[in-house]
Image: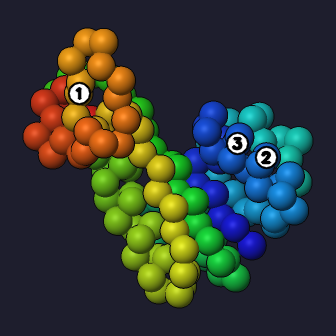
Amino acid sequence: MILVTGATGHIGNVLGRKLLDQGEKVRVLVCRGEDTIPIKDLDVEQVDGDVLDLASLEHAMRDVKTVYHLAGIISIMPGRNPFVWRVNVEGTRNVLAAARRAGIRRLVYTSSIHAIARAPHGVTMDESLGFDQNNPYGEYDR
């Protein structure tokens, strides 16, 4: 069984479809009130949960061999945003803690281009640019 967080998002539901195409059994973590239309026709097991709720993560990770963590809140607004920070940073810490407790042997964390250093205009951005720990653009980037 594979768990996908963020499966209702674009990359998450594409990943879920690819895993199903490969014959994998997929469980998806769905936050209360989240729009599930992107996954409505997928043969996945949906479990209610929240990356800010450690107990729900531990429940979702039962009998799971691999976790793909894609859940997050996107914001391009400048300045501090405590909710974006809580979900993206504290939520990821919770996912890691729950995976450790559940004995998960493989966890794949997916981030975005916002985590790497900005390149000058016209320069192709890729992983070789590295993480920008002093990114000044906004809470999501930080």
Nearer-N-terminus badge (3/1):
3
Q: Say which quarter of the image contains residue 105.
A: bottom right
Q: How far is disc 2 from disc 1 in space, using C-alphas?
A: 31 Å
Q: Quadrant of the N terminus?
A: bottom right
- Residue at far top of view: 121
The residue where tag 1 is placed is 118
The amino acid at mark 1 is Arg
In the drawing, does residue 136 fall left or right of residue 102?
Answer: left
Label 1 residue SS:
loop
Q: Quadrant of the C terminus?
A: top left
What coloring was used for the rendering? rainbow
Which one is nearer the viewer's eye here, 35 or 101? 101
Whether tag 3 and tag 2 are in contact, CB under 8 A, the answer is: yes
Residue shown at the point (52%, 50%) measured from the top left: 70
Q: How far is disc 3 from disc 2 in space, using C-alphas?
A: 6 Å
Label 3 residue SS:
helix
The residue where tag 2 is placed is 17
Q: Percent x, y for residue 35?
A: 68, 36
The amino acid at mark 3 is Asn
Relative to 57, say whether 45 is above or below: above
The residue where tag 3 is placed is 13
Q: How far is disc 3 from disc 1 in space, using C-alphas?
A: 28 Å
Q: Percent x, y for residue 63?
A: 70, 82
Q: For label 1, count other residues whose C-alpha is less than 10 Å away and answer few (under 14), some (14-19) or many (20+).
A: some
Relative to 139, say whether 1 is above or below: below
